[in-house]
Image: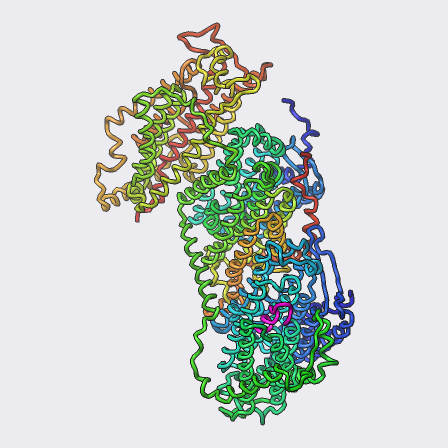
Amino acid sequence: MVEFTLISSLPFVLALLIVWPPVRALLGRGGQTLLLTSAIALMLVVYLGYFPYVANDQVLKLDLPWVEALGLHFTLYIDGLALLFGTIVVGIGVAVTLYTGFYFDDDQETGRFYTLLMAFTGSMLLLVFAGNVLTLFIAWELTSVISFLLISFKGAKSEAARVGAMRALIITGGGGLALIAGLLILSAAAGSTQFETILNTDLRSHPWYMGFTVLILLGCFTKSAQFPFHFWLPGGMTAPSPASAFLHSATMVKAGVYLLLRLEPTLGGSALWINALIGIGLITMLIGALFALQKRDLKALLAYSTISQLGALVALIGMPESAGIKAAVIGVLAHALYKAALFLMAGIVEHSTGTRNLDKLGGLRPLMPGAAVITALACLSMAGFPPMLGFVGKETLLDAAQPEGLLTTVPLIVMIISSILTVAVSARFAWDLFFAPAKADHHEHFHRPPLGLIISTGALAFMSLIGGVLLGPLIVPLIDAAVQKEFTLYLFPPEGLASPVFQTSLAVLALGGGIFAIRRWWLTWPDLPIPTGNQAYEWVIGAVNTCGDLLLRTQNGKLRHYLITILAGLALFIILLNFALGNLVQLRNLNFAFFNPPIDALRIVLILLAIITGLGAIILKKHLMAAISLSIMGYSVGGIFLLEPAPDVALVQILVETLATVLIIIMIARLSAKQREAILSVRFNHRYSVIRDVVIAASIGTVVGLFALIAVENRPVSSSINRPIALHYLQNTYRDLKITDTVGGIVTDYRGTDTVLEITVFAMAALGLLTLLTRPESRELIYGKAVQDIDQDFKKQVRLAEQAEREYEKELGVAQNERAESRMSTPLTRKIAALVLPFALLISAAHVLYSGVAPGDGFTAGVVAGLAVALWYVVYGYFEARERLNWLVPGRVVVLGLVLTLANAIMPEVFGGQFLEHITLSETWSPAGLHFASTLFFEIGIFLTVFGGSSIIMEAIAHPRELEERDIE
Amino acid sequence: MDIPTLEQLNLSAAFPAISLALGTCLLLLVDLFLPKNRKYLTAWLALGGLAVSFIFNLFAYNSSTTALEGMFIADQFTGFSNIAVIVATAISILLSIDYLKRHQMERGEYYILLLFSATGAMFMAAANDLVVIFVALELLSIPLYIMAAFRPNDARSEESGMKYFILGAFSSAFLVYGAALIYGASGTTNLTEIFSSVEGILATQSASSLYLLAGTALLVVGLGFKVAVVPFHMWTPDVYEGAPTPVTAYMSVVAKLGGFASFLRVMIIALPALALPESTIAVWQTTLWLIAAATLILGNFVAIAQTNVKRMLAYSSIAHAGYILMAVAAAGTAGLGDSAAQAALIYLLAYTFTNLGAFAVAMVLEKTDGSNVTLDDFIGLSRRQPLLAFLMAFFMLSLIGIPTTSGFIGKWLVFQVTLEAGLIPLAIIGVLTSVVSAYYYVRIIVNMYLRENEAAVGDEGEALPGASQYVNWAIYASFAGTLILGLLPVLATNLVNTVNLATMFPR
């Protein structure tokens, strides 16, 4: 067995050898031909010698672990069927290899072709000897890829050739993927990927039978060019003739037939199997023969005739009770011999005359007498003329299709019609090419084919004759090994001429001859309007392209749409998961008893306002309006908090809302007129997008709302205090901290560590913004410098840019009073702004000082002060504001605040206390109701950090550097 | 709380990742002293750092222990992911050296960001804690945002970085929210401990099960964004196209490596038992396989409509995320966690080599202004550059999943585990979309081999603006990886033979 494997891997070794140019150069063309032909011939002899070992259903096996951990094996499984196919591969291979040595004009091409040819031979042998699903699939796809490379061997000069090559790869390669899916499911059903196990398991009644059978049939039908996938084969005829002879008639296209034969014992016999194989097979057989009839191109004619034969083989395998297996096996052998010879002959004719068009050819017999004899022999075999091997094939075919009822006469009739047409096709090939009068003078550019071409082709054709004549001693042992059933095989039926099959065969020949005789009449008929799979293929490809284009529209480059998709996806998943877990979470069990707020007019108004403005933010058509609507919603929510009563939360909410609004206004003021125009104008026109946005917003809102409801109902209960935490805090704040503001207590003490971390993150974010929002050059100019040091040139640049901006606005027709800056900078606003900052700082100080006893804390203080700074930038403009704020260096404020906070947290540790320990002084000294404790410093630190941070943001946004690059053409 | 001792932290188990982090910090210092015109030295030092980490990884490879108080797992899963990350980063560095110089963006920070990001990916693969996952995710992502916008004065690069940043920050928030909800439900962020609390939570049928559920959904969103699965994929093509090509190549593999490693850990270690009563199939399986199917369909179909190869590869990377997600979905069936993790890991390694190779070839053709990477620019490449065309063809075949390439091994394992999990419709969608994918990958091969360039072929120098010795090394390395993994998958499968996420800890 090991020897067998080594011999079978010979083609791969040879391919690797001659892929190297030095080896090719060393061998020369003759050397390559000699080496490769003798190697393949040696393999043929060896394979023939192995037949006794596989007779009587014996099997040779080889099993090498490949990836053992994952159950991947490299397995060979060689029974009579596999060995017969292997023998056909190397048998035809010998002739093709010899032929190739004389076919190409160019040495370089010969070498390249030989490499591919050997790789293909190896892959094809691997395919037929494969012992498990994976090995088979690998070989299957390898043959598809090499076929593609051979089809495009000479480079595709025309669009049609390119399409053809691509089509062949997509259909056979794609079919291969369907096959592997089918085989994998089959393996799952059989419990093993090994053919040995699969073949000994009856899977016909498995629940997945339908699924994997259809997938496997898809794979086989695409590979073996069955209707409606048959059209790739004629499209693949741009391959060099030896490749067409070898791959596209004798071996590769038979891979599907081989696999069907291989799996027939396991899968065959079901209604699905019988109907699919006989139905598709017969259609293919008939269509192939019909199309072949009128073809002018020799290779196209042969291609369609091959399709017809493949159809016949598939139909035979589908016969109930394995009746057609014998005929299929002998058909494979006979067809391989004569069809390869004819393809090679087409190559010779093209080689010698420069054309393959039957309309231009004819009368070649005097020029190539040997070729004429060879062609005649091969065509006689194809037509099924006794005593050729093809005749035996046709006889067994008709025998297998013997009707048993009215319905089963249909296959017989179709087969007879197709056979008659095939006779006519064979006659056209042989007669019109060699014996009919010449249509053009070939003498001028005719050159005699090299002897090697004639010998290799002739060998195949003579084998058709010898195989028929010496049927008993030569062919029967091969078929015997391959067919598991008992069978009889004979050239002439024992009944003699009385046999109905024999009579039918002769009638077919006569009728075929008759149709050939009247060819002048039908040859010019228009093509039959039979739909070919090609239109479907084009349609599918078109549909795939359209799908791509349609899906592409979801990708429009707009950030907000991307965000919408993410949100929508999230809502969908939560809903999906909820359905999946449906009976675990029962929302109707929710208890709304807790939700019992006092209902009053103000509350209702605020809630309605929040809802309406929320909706407004979605449906209002202008960006600015939507933004304002959003802020109003924020204020309403703040109001609701205030009524709750949750004054701390309300304060923060309102301040943050104000800050955000101010930021938007500053940004709008800083935009160029053109950009401002865009932002103030309609933001969408599409009614559907509004509906979409409302739906998405509503679903996200529902999801989040649901969480909130459930969270409120299930208030966390601390295990250590065994009651709701909120209650615990409310009752114990004063006892623990001597302050009355529970929120302040939580922020500065109970969750003090969190606050420290948060404020650190905030400071980092602010400092990060400082670097992110500024360019190195302008940072050097502005930040960290007193304003009088600002480069006068820079100021000048900015002024110029501003002037240009104004002119542009004039052109646009923006009235002076509509300009944001001019509207904001009036004497009154200037006065107000001047007052606001000190006031704000005062309020901040109050917030900080009374943080322990009243709502408000360092954070709100920082925001209030930051807002006042923002107002200055809006009212005074950047330069004046910077001049007035000369004392404020925000970066330093942030750092100072951070240091203070951290120091306050760490200090107690230094003096032997704990991290963030609370030290209170208020019991000994508390003037004016103030509460003095270490938390005060903590609050001051927070205030400074937030104040500095918001100042940084304001300054960065108000900075005029953007003017430099404004789009003001 | 007691402060743990160094021994308790078991730092040595986490050394591959820690050494890379330390090395990067060191490099940050060294880079300051390198003169501006010799920044390529940083690249070599970065490679050295990777090599050191690789060696540490070899020592830690077959360990099976935790470090940093159970927050970090050192096992074969970690080791294998580390190898993939290190290899991908090294190849990306080779791709970058010449590219940065040509685009006048040669700055030492680039390599440092790259290494930080790689460190993040390594921590993600090892994280056994939701908080660590989040921190590692940010460590992985933030350098990527910056690198995406690294090309100076190029609006597309800036747009790419900005989009990535905003959407990335957005989805990180989902991840944190999800982690918080799961913490709320289970009281822990440790994956192993979450697992042990899941059954109890489900048994009570309380609100906590909804939290667990919603938390899981939010985690899927956060991680799904990182690995670019539908519908969280939309940033991918824009970012891939705009970012500098070596960065695109890098993030197309390393972000996926980190993201999927965490995905697998969370789903297989923490949440496999999130199932209906009496069921052995986790509830998230349905969701994940629907996402996977949508990802496969969208990624593969839209890739067809692309003419820019970088964009095409972006959609192809979305599609490949779909294939890997097939394995994650399969892990939802009880007992398949380990084989699903193995399949996903091998797929990731195979994809790493192949995709880096494909991007490298695209980079060789790309001109400094970012042009010359359309499908038409590949026309006739086999005549001009036979070797390059062959390699590209090989990468394309591997992306399709043709046998003897690594792509095939990955697909084979993933399909196998999907079928074992009984997700037959998903497997069939996977196969059919593979056929679709053949269509656009083969188009490149057709252009290279079967079409002649009608326009006169420019001189050789112009034809290959991005060629350099280092890029060639990168391409050869990718090719070797793709080929060896395809021919001898046993090398890779032996490396994951004891991956046991589902069984590492006594349950």
Q: How is the image coloured?
A: rainbow
From the viewer's side, name the closer residue of A462 and A832. Answer: A462
The quarter in which the N terminus of chain A is drawn is bottom right
Give the side of residue B193 with respect to residue A549, left or right: right
User: Left of A36 or right of it: where is A400?
Assistant: left
Q: Residue furthest top?
A: A924
For the question of whether residue B394 can be seen, the reply is no
Question: Which percent across, then down, holds residue A71?
Answer: 69, 53
Residue under the image location 70 percent in, 62 percent down: A131
Instruction: Name the one closer to the observer, A600 or B204.
Output: B204
Q: Quadrant of residue B117?
A: top right
Q: Residue A56 appears at what percent x and percent y?
A: 76, 69
What is the number of callouts on the image? 0
A196 lies above or below A51:
above
Q: What secondary structure is the stretch in magenta mostly built from? A: helix
Find residue B248 and report its horizontal and vertical position in percent. Answer: 52, 50
Q: Is residue A392 left or right of residue A439?
A: right
- The residue sitting at 27% across, 24% down in the picture is A832
Q: Quadrant of residue A535?
A: bottom left
Residue occupying image coordinates x 48% and y 36%: B173
* Residue beneath the point at 72% across and 75% down: A478
In the picture shown, does residue B428 fall above or below A700? below
Residue A209 in the magenta stretch? The answer is no
Task: Answer left or right for A555 relative to B316.
Answer: left
Which quadrant would residue A244 be assigned to in this image?
bottom right
Q: In the rendered structure, which segment of residues is drawn in magenta?
A: A310-324
Residue B236 visible to the viewer: yes
